[in-house]
Image (spheres, helix red, strand yellow):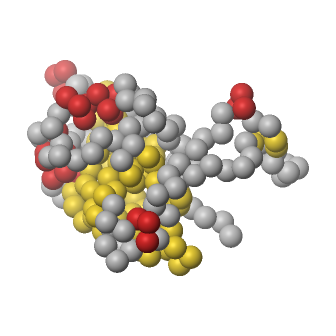
Amino acid sequence: MDTKTNSLSARRSAMPLSGRRQVSSAYTWLGMGALVIGLVTGLASQARAIPNNPVSATGYASDMVKAYRDCDPGLASDVTQNAFFPRPACPPPALSSLTCLFSTSGKGKVKMRVLPSGDVSYKLKMKKLDLACEGEQLDFVVKYQQTNDDCSGGTACTAVNTELILGSCTVSSGNCTINSRFNTDSTANFGGPAFASGLETSLAMDGCGLFLGNELAFRCGIYIP
């Protein structure tokens, strides 16, 4: 892949990332749909400047699935056979990364939680990946929409969608675990914290996944047997 002109790549090239390999966002992220849970930080007692926040939305969790290349509608040559919801389709499915796969009993999960400080803790666990993944570094990336009271004069606003590079792990014995916080990782990668309490911050998750170099190896999702 030679597409490295996107905003995420530009930020990585402009800001030192402690020797991490470059991650490209050339793959289109899938929206989380009904799985979206806003991570709302802030103080419940303060006046609400952001319209229609829930009373509480402090957690997010998702399983991890293997990432496939998106189907370009212009190249779709088939259609799914669901009579109620047929969709244009591209056969056969193409894995985004052939290097790092689940073993026959592999699985993964990520959990996020808002802390009283306004930071967001997260824990990602990948278990029983295949031998080809051994020793490889996986980078965890999230894409979200942020709405809070952080614009000029403390006014409410919605920022352009953000792709934030968080932690990374090296696969060992088929496992890969990251246990960290958004602000810890954003400070290490970009020089400062991403979030603070008291700003009524609502995060709508557009996607999350694990990159192997420039390839999206795994993404947040569900598997229906």
Relative to 3, 74 lies left or right: right
Task: Name the residue nearer the viewer: 211 or 123.
Answer: 211
The residue drawn where x is 45% and y is 48% is 216
Q: Is residue 164 above or below residue 184?
A: above
The residue drawn where x is 36% and y is 73% is 175
- Residue 94 in the image: state x and y as whole percent: 62, 49
For the C terminus, the image quarter is bottom right
Relative to 162, 61 lies left or right: right
Task: Name the residue nearer the viewer: 137 or 219.
Answer: 137
- Residue 191 in the image: state x and y as whole percent: 11, 39
Q: Quarter-wise, where is residue 189 in the image?
A: top left
The residue drawn where x is 74% and y is 46% is 91
Whether residue 184 is visible: yes
Relative to 47, 111 lies left or right: right
Q: Is residue 46 above or below residue 131?
A: above
Task: Name the residue nearer the viewer: 149 or 145.
Answer: 145
Task: Name the residue nearer the viewer: 135 or 219.
Answer: 135
- Residue 57 in the image: state x and y as whole percent: 38, 55
Q: Quarter-wise, where is residue 116 in the image?
A: bottom left
The residue drawn where x is 53% and y is 78% is 105
Q: Is residue 55 above or below residue 191?
A: below
